[in-house]
Amino acid sequence: MSTALAFDTLAFASPMPGLEAAEGFSLRGIAGAEGLYALEVEKPRVRMFVADASVYVPDYEPAVPAASLEALGLASVANATVLVVVNPAPEKTTVNLMAPLLVNAEGTCLQVILDGAVYPLRAELARQV
């Protein structure tokens, strides 16, 4: 499911690893960049970029555990917007396919750490020409 997202408050069903104390995330679109978002929280001050997987890695189909879907009230991953964390760097931009964020229509989300080595932690994004 791909939609234009924007949430003043994005609620995590379970805290993001490494950001357990953070509350009150917001998600806003980046002007002129379809499917690219800033995920921000005030305390601690954090901003990261996330991308709609259906736009940037359209063949990405993670096998999400049933418990993760249940936590979001979803019947399948097709009912979620799947976001991947973007890691920009001067030499190349990568996305984390090992730990996607799932967002339901109500603005509840969950970062899922996938089992196995099927998807890389740093998958290079192909340049669009």
Image (tube, grey):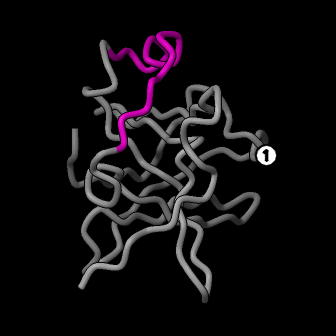
Q: Residue at (56%, 26%) from the top-left corner? A: 13
Q: Which element carries disc 1, helix, strand or loop?
A: loop
Above/below status of 5 relative to 63: below
Above/below status of 9 relative to 113: below
Position in image of residue 27 (x %, y %): 43, 56
Q: Residue at (44%, 35%) from the top-left corner? A: 102
Depth check, front residue: 126 or 3: 126
Q: Is residue 62 magenta?
A: yes
User: Is most of the magenta stretch helix, strand or loop?
Assistant: loop
Above/below status of 128 relative to 125: below
Position in image of residue 66 (x %, y %): 47, 10
Q: Residue beneath label 1, please?
A: 18
Q: Residue farthest to the front?
A: 118
What stretch of residues is rendered in magenta?
60-74
Q: Residue at (59%, 48%) from the top-left corner? A: 120
Q: Is residue 64 magenta?
A: yes
The quarter holding residue 117 reads top right
Q: Residues within 10 Å of mark 1 (few under 14, many from 20)?
A: few
Q: Which quadrant: the N terminus?
A: top left
